[in-house]
Image: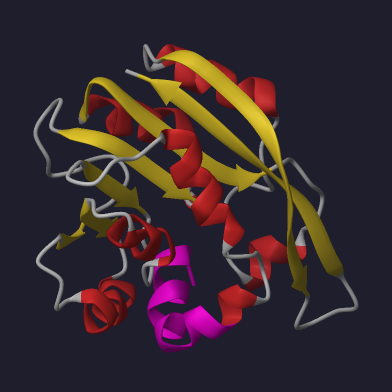
Amino acid sequence: MNSKKYFDEISNEWDSIRQSFFSDSIREMACDVAQVKAGQTAVDMGAGTGFITEELLKRGLHVIAIDQSKEMLAVLTRKYGSSSNITCIQADAYMIPLDNESVDFVMANMFLHHVEDPGRAIKEMARILKPGGKLIITDLDQHEHEFLRTEQYDVWLGFERPKVHDWLANANLTSIRIEDLNEQCCCDSCESCGSAAISIFIASAVK
């Protein structure tokens, strides 16, 4: 089992599962930090079933939802496919099928800890940003909850914030800020007595 297969298998249940992990306010804060405006174009990277996409559509943006899981995108399409402001693309983190400097924002919520090479993924996300465009990452601080590797197929047990800063800088992004969202991701183990309450950071940077 890997993360793609895991998300394929739980795609129809993901919305209800996700609700116990973190609150809807995360997407609102991410859009506020980005200062998104109606009519602009945003990529929802690792879109899943559309947690971030929903808020972007509500704010009048055109959304390009990208995910490696065809099944997750199928759920997203059933929910929002009637909107003329959404395009769904199945792709991985390292080869986004979009032109250089073609979008205003890239949003990546709880995506990076499922990626083998976050630095490479960040460079690819930076590539498609227009000059002045913004990358917004919301993800987990470093933690020690090993059951998330085996039960949810997390590749990384969160991140040290200085390392995230280095990846953003190495992608030639500027105005880097990494802050606490004052939110936690909470999850109980299905196979043990373990439980996790992990702090969430928001990282923003400009092309």
Residue at the image position 55 percent from the left and 44 percent from the top: 138
Residue 190 vertical placement versus 24 (above, below)? below
Compared with residue 168, is residue 160 higher up or lower down, i.e. above or below?
below
Task: Choose between 5 and 70: the one closer to the eye.
Answer: 70
Question: In the picture shown, does residue 103 fall above or below 149?
Answer: above
Magenta stretch, main secondary structure class: helix
Report whether 64 appears left or right of 156: left
Asked whether the viewer can see residue 109, the reply is: yes
**Where is residue 60 shown, x and y percent of the image?**
24, 55
Q: Residue furthest right?
A: 193
Pinpoint residue 116: horizontal percent, then vertical percent: 47, 43
* Residue drawn at 69 percent across, 63 percent down: 148
Query: Count the marks: how many?
Result: 0
Q: Quick check: can you spot residue 110?
A: no
> Image quarter for residue 63?
bottom left
Residue depicted at x 39% and y 44%? 107
Residue at figure coordinates x 58%, y 21% from the top left: 177
Left or right side of 77 for 194:
right
- Return the x and y of residue 82 as percentages of the image width and height: 14, 78
Q: Which residues are magenta?
A: 1-16
Q: Quadrant of residue 54?
A: bottom left
Q: Nearer the viewer, residue 176 or 4?
A: 176
Q: Say whether residue 76 is magenta.
A: no
On screen, residue 43 versus residue 108, left or right, reads left
Looking at the picture, how far across and down is residue 100, in whole percent?
A: 13, 27
> Which image quadrant: the C terminus?
top left
